[in-house]
Amino acid sequence: MRLRGSLGLFFILTLELFGAHAFLLQPSIEQGESATLVLSAKGESIKFPTIDQIDGFTVVSHQNRQSIELNNGVVTKQLDHYVTFYPDRNVTIPAYEVIVDGKKELTESLHLPFVQKVVTSAHKEPFSFEMKVSNTTPMRHEGVKLSFIFKRNKNENLVDMRFLKPTLEGFWVKEVGKDNPHVEGDDVVHTVQYMIYPQKSGEQHIVPAKIEIARQVCFT
């Protein structure tokens, strides 16, 4: 996710599910990007189908993530199965059969759009503000690394710079700190990092973060 000026963050958290459910980590992809399908189910005994290809594209990796929840003395197991592949066109993902506690559950079919990269001009803006998260689908109470990255052209003379952190309601927050500025090509890079822990399931939003800067201007 790349945003300029101000930022907003959208989390898709694992919902309280019963039976089986399917979703994509990316709403769309570009050339060279990987796509990840997630099959998710809750129950004592869960069996996912064997998926070697999706719509003609070979699956390159499979990963599982398991979590245990205790509600009112009842233990519930959730298992997520991650399937990664590299499509180069629009993809139709079929419904898959998952066996949950001996019962056949059918996931929904999905559509993944393939977006052609837009060729932009060689002109580069003197400033950019980017946000990165280590995981866009965390479990409740699972730590996520949140980084805010500000880049400025090294020829830009700044007399002041102030980071205005976002409101992080619904998260337990630990500030990791600020990295020392370093040079990457023509840019000076400033990074602020946090560890955030979602405290509830469902969609979580972070209001925009901002960078205030004061530039030195010369008049002739």
Image (cartoon, rainbow, N blue to C red):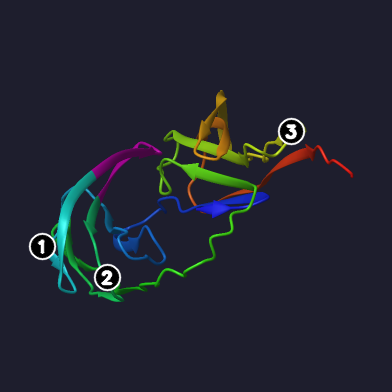
- Disc 2 is placed on an element classified as loop
Q: Is residue 200 left or right of residue 38?
A: right
Would you name the residue on which mark 3 appears?
161
Q: Please tell me whether residue 86 is drawn above or below residue 157 in the rendered image.
A: below
- Classify mark 2: residues with Cα within 10 Å, few (<14), some (14-19) or many (20+): some
Would you name the residue on which mark 1 appears?
52
Alpha-carbon span between mark 1 and mark 3: 51 Å
Asked if the residue under mark 3 is in contact with the one under mark 1, i.e. CB atoms within 8 Å, the reply is no
Q: Please tell me whether residue 82 is drawn above or below residue 112 in the rendered image.
A: above
Q: Nearer the viewer, mark 1 or mark 3?
A: 3
* For marks 3 and 2 on the same chain, the one whose residue lies earlier in the sequence: 2
Q: Nearer the viewer, mark 1 or mark 2?
A: 2
Q: Residue at x 59, y 59 (%)?
A: 123
- Classify mark 3: residues with Cα within 10 Å, few (<14), some (14-19) or many (20+): few
Residue 184 in view of the camera:
yes
- The amino acid type, in three-letter code, at marker 3 is Met
Q: Position of residue 200 (x, y in %)?
A: 51, 43
Would you name the residue on which mark 2 appears?
88
In this picture, which residue range is highlighted in magenta? 65-80
Asked if the residue under mark 2 is in contact with the one under mark 3, i.e. CB atoms within 8 Å, the reply is no
Residue 218 is tagged as none
- Disc 3 is placed on an element classified as strand
Q: Is residue 219 left or right of residue 73?
A: right
Asked if the residue under mark 2 is in contact with the one under mark 1, i.e. CB atoms within 8 Å, the reply is no
Q: Residue furthest right?
A: 220
- Residue 66 in magenta stretch: yes
- The amino acid type, in three-letter code, at marker 2 is Asp
